[in-house]
Amino acid sequence: MRLEKVFAIQFSGLYPLYVKKAESKGRSNDEVDQVICWLTGYSREGLRNQIGSDNDLEAFFDQAPDFNPKASLIKGVVCGIRVEEVEHPLMQKIRYLDKLVDELAKGKALDKILRQ
């Protein structure tokens, strides 16, 4: 898939997929929200506003209030690609979020996911 198509995906369409993935493995919607808020700096209300908007992934990350500097500690593979080696900054942010949701779904402790 071309980068432009990935960036144009609406966050409101992707969010339920993240929740479904986590909930199918016994995690909660609240934990998904906590992970997203940790990464992006959105408040719960800000996240709800994004979910209710038509923003694509590019706008979602552009409007993120405070992208977490600890995101660089996120390592691993998503879709066969090492997240720490992704060169495009926006794609790397998307992969960081994918990786955090994967870790949540795999049962990793929340404090470890949030790099505490």
Image: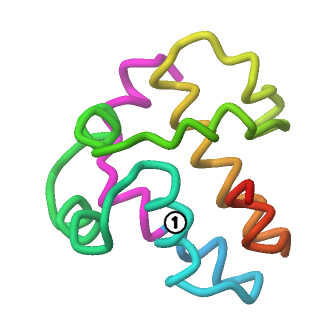
Q: Is residue 30 left or right of residue 53?
A: right
The quarter of the picture where residue 112 lies is: bottom right
Tell which of 70 and 2 is nearer to you: 70
**Residue drawn at (73%, 72%), measured in percent from left and top?**
110
Q: Say which of 20 and 105 sits in front.
A: 105
Query: Is 24 drawn above or below residue 82 in the view shown?
Result: below
Q: Residue at x 82, y 74 (%)?
A: 109
Of all residues, the one furthest to the top in this rendering is 87
Estimate the x, y position of residue 108 in percent, counting from the top left.
84, 69
Decide which of 99, 6 is in the foreground and name it: 99
Q: Going 75% across and 24% down the picture, which residue do you hit? A: 84
Q: Residue at position x 76%, y 37% from top?
A: 79
* In the image: residue 65, left or right of residue 111: left
Q: Which quadrant holds the C terminus?
A: bottom right
- Does the magenta-highlighted stretch encompass residue 3? yes
Q: Which residues are magenta?
A: 1-16
Query: What secondary structure is the magenta-colored segment mainly?
Result: helix
Q: Which residue is at the far front? A: 116
- Residue 42 vs 88, above or below: the answer is below
Please name whichever residue, 4 or 77, is drawn nearer the observer in this view of the structure. 77
Judged from the image, the secondary structure of the residue bearing numbered disc 1 is: helix
Specify whether 13 is left or right of 105. Answer: left
> Does residue 26 appear left or right of residue 63 in this picture?
right
Residue 21 located within the stretch drawn in magenta: no
Q: Amino acid at mark 1?
A: Leu
Residue 41 in percent (x, y) is at: 38, 53
Q: How many marks?
A: 1
- Relative to 25, say whether 112 is above or below: above
- Give the labeled residue for mark 1: 17
